Image (cartoon, rainbow, N blue to C red):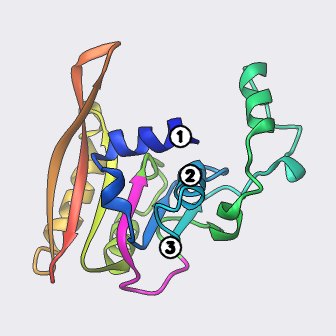
């Protein structure tokens, strides 16, 4: 869980203090919601929720038909403590149709969840912005240079039509050892007061 938590912080250019006391939504949390679980277990925030298109997976409801390429990863997965408080804060859903009231969240993290080509990006971005409180922030990414395609241009087009009540910018986030020349970016959307 700690490794996933630190990966989220690094990828989304956040610190633990950025999370403290905030109401947070993690869209695309994967089916075990490790980031949410870590925040709850370490009392970083008690007001955090997870949404993913897949059902929540725990040891007691794991489908053995799932194909695992790596037996070590499968065994680690089985041992992971996913019968945690995160299970009660997990909703199955899509970014386009989130089950929360408008103006509910201080921070929305969308990590690698807007990449499905069948996704209605207009609806997803509109939904994310509607869930932000005044002064709230959404962080979406990471995007690689080759992601700056039709999808990203579509997201930017939606955001440019919302500039009366949001601000947005791109931030460089990290490089990897295997590709030090490739900078990943995140999109930061801030709802105006």
**Is there a contact, CB below 8 Å, between mark 3 and mark 2?**
no
Classify residue 172 as left or right of residue 41.
left
Counting residues from the N terminus, which is met first, the one under dot 2 or under dot 1? 1
Labels 3 and 2: the sequence-earlier one: 2
* Residue 76 in the image: above or below residue 186: above
The residue depicted at 80 percent of the width and 28 percent of the height is 75
On the image, the x and y values in percent for residue 67 come to 79, 30
Q: Image point 42% across, 49% down: which residue?
A: 111
Dot 2: few (<14), some (14–19), or many (≥20) neighbours within 10 Å?
A: many
Q: Is residue 178 left or right of residue 135?
A: right
Label 3, secondary structure: give it: loop
- Looking at this rendering, what residue extends furthest in the top direction? 178
Q: Are marks 3 and 1 in contact (CB under 8 Å)?
A: no
164 magenta-colored: no
Residue extending farthest front: 43
Magenta stretch bounds? 99-110
Mark 3 vs mark 1: which is more N-terminal? 1
Check disc 3: other Cα within 10 Å, few if <14, some if 14-19, many if 20+: some
Q: CA distance from mark 3 to mark 2?
A: 12 Å
What crowding class fits label 1: few (fewer than 14 Cα within 10 Å), some (14-19), or many (20 or more)? few
- Estimate the x, y position of residue 94 in percent, counting from the top left: 54, 65
The residue that disc 2 covers is 38
Q: Say which quarter of the image contains residue 93.
A: bottom right
- Residue at 30% x, 40% y is 143
In contact (CB < 8 Å): disc 2 and disc 1: yes
- Residue carrying label 3: 47
In whole angstroms, how far apart are the C-alphas of marks 3 and 1? 19 Å
Which image quarter is the C terminus in? bottom left
Residue 2 got which mark? 1
């Amino acid at each position: 869980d700690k490794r996933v938590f630190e990966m989220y912080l690094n990828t989304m250019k956040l610190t633990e203090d950025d999370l403290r006391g905030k109401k947070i939504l993690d869209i695309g949390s994967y089916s075990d919601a490790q980031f949410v679980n870590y925040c709850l277990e370490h009392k970083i925030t008690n007001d955090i929720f997870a949404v993913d298109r897949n059902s929540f997976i725990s040891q007691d409801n794991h489908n053995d038909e799932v194909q695992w390429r790596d037996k070590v990863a499968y065994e680690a997965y089985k041992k992971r403590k996913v019968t945690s408080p995160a299970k009660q804060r997990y909703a199955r859903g899509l970014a386009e149709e989130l089950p929360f009231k408008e103006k509910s969240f201080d921070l929305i993290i969308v990590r690698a969840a807007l990449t499905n080509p069948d996704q209605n990006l207009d609806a997803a971005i509109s939904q994310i912005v509607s869930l932000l409180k005044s002064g709230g922030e959404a962080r979406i990414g990471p995007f690689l240079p080759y992601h700056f395609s039709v999808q990203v241009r579509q997201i930017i087009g939606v955001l440019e039509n919302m500039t009366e009540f949001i601000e947005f910018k791109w931030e460089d986030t990290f490089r990897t050892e295997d590709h030090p020349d490739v900078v990943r970016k995140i999109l930061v959307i801030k709802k105006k007061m």
